[in-house]
Image (cartoon, rainbow, N blue to C red):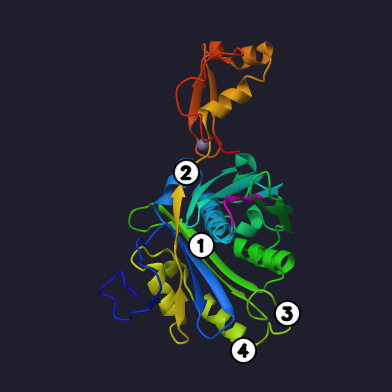
């Protein structure tokens, strides 16, 4: 047992050393209950991903929540791979994409972007609701894809974008796709002091018949145990989920200390895009000379990565078949 903060007045059961307070997912279990959960806190990772774009605040907030959800879901998969969340709707935010790459046990890379229809967005006023932007008003769906490489099966689950919040939609997803009673809270906002983006979230899941290997049903969903765990989880405030001075362990202790909470190895989250100069060059080389001509401006071809907003420039002469792949690493490109 080790405690990272010697100033803590209420030590909690910790199985592994705490190394970081931001940018992590912390799995946990409530003692004596068939309830497991995860909490996530994004600091610089949220800031880095969101600030690469020029989104209006109410819209950026939604991307922050998607990032928190991607981290919670991505850290559940058992093998290296990519978990992608993609929301499509006819509203002012036609597309929101976030993904989590499980690089290895305990480390995940996050990235994300959204497309914004400024004309439609203008109709929603200064403080549009989630419901108005991508909720049921405009229809649409959220797809969750797990891709664990060519030798593993690709999995996709889909849920309608119906709900007042992204948390509502995620809850529906778990209920319909995973048949696991789940309660979840997600939030994102600027830090009131620094103005930097932060995001946070927490989820609890009820293993209605205990651990794996036994049939899970909703029979006991109304059980006191699950009801109590849900109520405790929902007592968390937005401020607590985002507060840089309140690390996840202390937050979990605050919420569940009456029953006891056990935390497990954290996942470290890193803002890291998968775009790659060598791979882009490979794609460009498949275009015809005519197409290349059309794409060339002032003697250069510019390609912008939607995720991280980085611009790559290519010399059209490099695109003819056997040219060198140009500067920058081309190895390690991930699909
Ligand atoms: Zn990129």
Q: Residue at x 71, y 61 (%)?
A: 162
Whole-angstrom CA distance, mark 2 to mark 1, is: 21 Å
The answer to whether mark 2 and mark 3 are in CB contact below 8 A is no
Q: Which residue is mark 1?
A: 187
Q: Which residue is mark 2?
A: 272
Mark 2 or mark 1: which comes first in sequence?
1
Residue farthest front in this picture:
151
Mark 4 or mark 2: which comes first in sequence?
4
> Residue 187 in the image: x percent, y percent?
51, 62
Residue numbers of the magenta segment? 79-86
Q: Which residue is mark 4?
A: 224
Q: Main secondary structure of the magenta part?
A: strand
Q: Let me know if residue 323 is in the magenta part.
A: no
Mark 2 or mark 3: which comes first in sequence?
3
Identify the element where label 1 is drawn.
Answer: strand
Whole-angstrom CA distance, mark 1 to mark 4, is: 27 Å
């Amino acid at each position: 047992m080790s405690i990272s903060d010697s100033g803590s007045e209420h030590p909690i059961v910790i199985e592994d050393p705490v190394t970081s307070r931001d940018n992590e997912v912390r799995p946990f279990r409530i003692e004596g209950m068939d309830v497991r959960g995860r909490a996530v806190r994004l600091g610089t990772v949220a800031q880095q991903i969101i600030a690469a774009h020029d989104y209006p605040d109410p819209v950026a907030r939604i991307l922050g929540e998607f990032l928190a959800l991607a981290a919670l879901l991505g850290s559940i998969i058992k093998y290296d791979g990519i978990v992608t969340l993609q929301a499509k709707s006819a509203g002012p935010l036609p597309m929101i994409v976030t993904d989590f790459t499980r690089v290895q046990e305990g480390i995940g890379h996050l990235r994300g972007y959204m497309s914004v229809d400024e004309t439609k967005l203008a109709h929603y006023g200064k403080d549009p609701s989630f419901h108005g932007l991508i909720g049921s008003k405009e229809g649409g769906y959220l797809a969750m894809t797990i891709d664990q490489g060519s030798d593993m099966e690709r999995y996709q689950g889909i849920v309608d974008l119906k709900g007042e919040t992204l948390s509502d939609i995620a809850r529906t997803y778990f209920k319909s796709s995973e048949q696991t009673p789940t309660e979840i809270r997600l939030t994102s906002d600027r830090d009131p002091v620094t103005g930097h983006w932060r995001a946070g979230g927490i989820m609890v899941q009820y293993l209605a018949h205990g651990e794996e290997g036994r049939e899970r049903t909703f029979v006991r969903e109304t059980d006191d145990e699950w009801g109590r765990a849900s109520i405790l989880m929902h007592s968390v405030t937005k401020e607590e989920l985002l507060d840089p001075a309140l690390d996840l362990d202390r937050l979990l202790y605050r919420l569940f200390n009456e029953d006891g909470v056990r935390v497990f190895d954290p996942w470290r989250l890193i803002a890291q895009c998968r775009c790659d100069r060598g791979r882009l060059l490979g794609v460009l080389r498949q275009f015809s000379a005519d197409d290349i001509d059309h794409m060339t401006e002032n003697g250069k071809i510019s390609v912008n990565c939607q995720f991280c907003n980085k611009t790559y420039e290519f010399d059209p002469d490099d695109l003819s078949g056997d040219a060198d792949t140009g500067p920058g690493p081309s190895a390690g490109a991930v699909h």
